[in-house]
Image (cartoon, grey):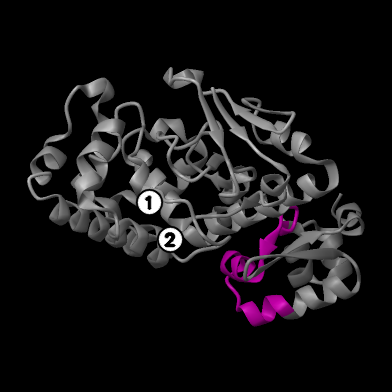
């Protein structure tokens, strides 16, 4: 078990973030363990031809262990709630090449007993290997995830954070953690995460004003932490609402009576707002301009059929209780 000890100042500073770099790195598991994340398979099957054409594809695959572990240095804790991919990647680029071998071995040696050949050979020049890994990640992001997957996935992660923050504010830390994952337990200022699945030794970690950040992800079956206890305190957990990602591929039908009452455009919007969604995401899913979506949302907001909340630079919209009644 890992036990995070939080003082009053630490508790007040608990925060959430969504990380495009974390999702890029963890999504590499889709190419090595695709059956582990069924909700993502409909999105990643069409991406396979794009991935197979990447020059850095074999190197990226080698970064995932047989037990799905990935080196800690590839997923630095974000410094802001919604960092840009390139900003996060610059942190990875700044990794000391001298620590590369220990980072890779810590994550990838068990249970193989040896590093993948591409990495073992690359360690003859750690600085060059680090540069090649960063180049491959950027290529993967730009050609596969940023254009085809992140617009929807990023919206799901933002919606999750809005929901968790609301639960924390209304019901407290214990309720929020219980909803996140049954492996998390909060009592007397100590957050315990059960890591029995990897037989790691028990550890007591003093947060000590360093902040504790929660990160939703589409590529975890349970709440998890970094391999090393020396990393800044962070816990990633399975994002809620991943099932709604399929709606971007096959939007739900709009009830006829609702369309007659509100008009088809506003009825379609209201139907999609059972989870918090941004204007940009709605425009992508409906194939219209963000300006058109904003006009309809303004009417729905004025008539109290939707509510809104801000996360970082995004404003997310959600059906109000009145909107819920109209849709059911």
Residue 83 horizontal side relative to residue 72, left or right: right
Horizontal and vertical percent position of residue 98:
20, 47
- Tell me the residue that label 2 is attached to: 148
User: Is 146 left, or right, of 127 in this rendering?
Assistant: right
Q: Position of residue 310 (x, y in %)?
A: 71, 66
Q: Position of residue 32 (x, y in %)?
A: 31, 35
Question: Does residue 249 lie above or below 202 as drawn?
Answer: below
Q: Is residue 95 above or below residue 197?
A: below
Residue 50 horizontal/vertical position (percent): 29, 56
**SS for tag 2?**
helix
Location of residue 226 with respect to 136 vertically, above or below? above
The quarter of the rendered structure image containing the N terminus is top right
Q: Residue at x 12, y 44 (%)?
A: 123
Tag nearer the camera, 2 or 1: 2
Crowdedness near tag 1: few (<14), some (14–19) or many (≥20) residues, C-alpha within 10 Å: few
CB within 8 Å, label 2 to label 1: yes
Q: Give whichever of 72, 161 is nearer the camera.
A: 72
9 magenta-colored: no
- The residue that disc 1 covers is 46
* Viewer-proximal residue among 129 and 327: 129
Span of residues in magenta:
272-294
């Amino acid at each position: 078990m890992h036990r995070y000890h939080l003082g009053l100042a630490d508790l007040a500073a608990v925060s959430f973030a969504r990380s495009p770099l974390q999702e890029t790195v963890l999504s590499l598991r889709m190419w090595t363990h695709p059956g582990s994340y069924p909700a993502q398979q409909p999105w990643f099957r069409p991406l396979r031809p794009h991935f197979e054409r990447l020059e850095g594809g074999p190197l990226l695959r080698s970064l995932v262990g047989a037990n799905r572990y990935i080196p800690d240095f590839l997923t630095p804790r974000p410094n802001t709630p919604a960092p840009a991919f390139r900003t996060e990647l610059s942190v990875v680029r700044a990794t000391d090449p001298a620590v590369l071998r220990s980072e890779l071995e810590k994550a990838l040696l068990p249970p193989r007993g040896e590093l993948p050949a591409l990495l073992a050979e690359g360690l003859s020049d750690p600085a060059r290997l680090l540069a090649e890994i960063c180049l491959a990640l950027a290529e993967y992001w730009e050609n596969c995830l940023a254009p085809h997957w992140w617009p929807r996935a990023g919206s799901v992660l933002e919606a999750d954070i809005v929901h968790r923050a609301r639960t924390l504010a209304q019901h407290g830390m214990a309720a929020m953690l219980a909803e996140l994952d049954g492996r998390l337990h909060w009592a007397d200022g100590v957050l315990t995460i059960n890591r029995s699945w990897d037989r790691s030794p028990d550890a007591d970690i003093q947060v000590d004003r360093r902040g504790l950040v929660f990160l939703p992800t589409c590529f975890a079956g349970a709440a998890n932490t970094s391999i090393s206890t020396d990393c800044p305190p962070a816990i990633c957990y399975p994002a809620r609402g991943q099932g709604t990602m399929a709606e971007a591929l096959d939007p739900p039908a709009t009830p006829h009576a609702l369309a007659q009452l509100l008009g088809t455009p506003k009825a379609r919007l209201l139907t999609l707002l059972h989870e918090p969604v941004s204007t940009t995401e709605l425009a992508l899913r409906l194939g219209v301009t963000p300006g058109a979506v904003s006009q309809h949302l303004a009417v729905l907001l004025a008539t109290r059929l939707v509510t809104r909340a801000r996360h970082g630079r995004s404003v997310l919209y959600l059906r109000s209780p009145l909107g819920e009644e109209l849709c059911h």
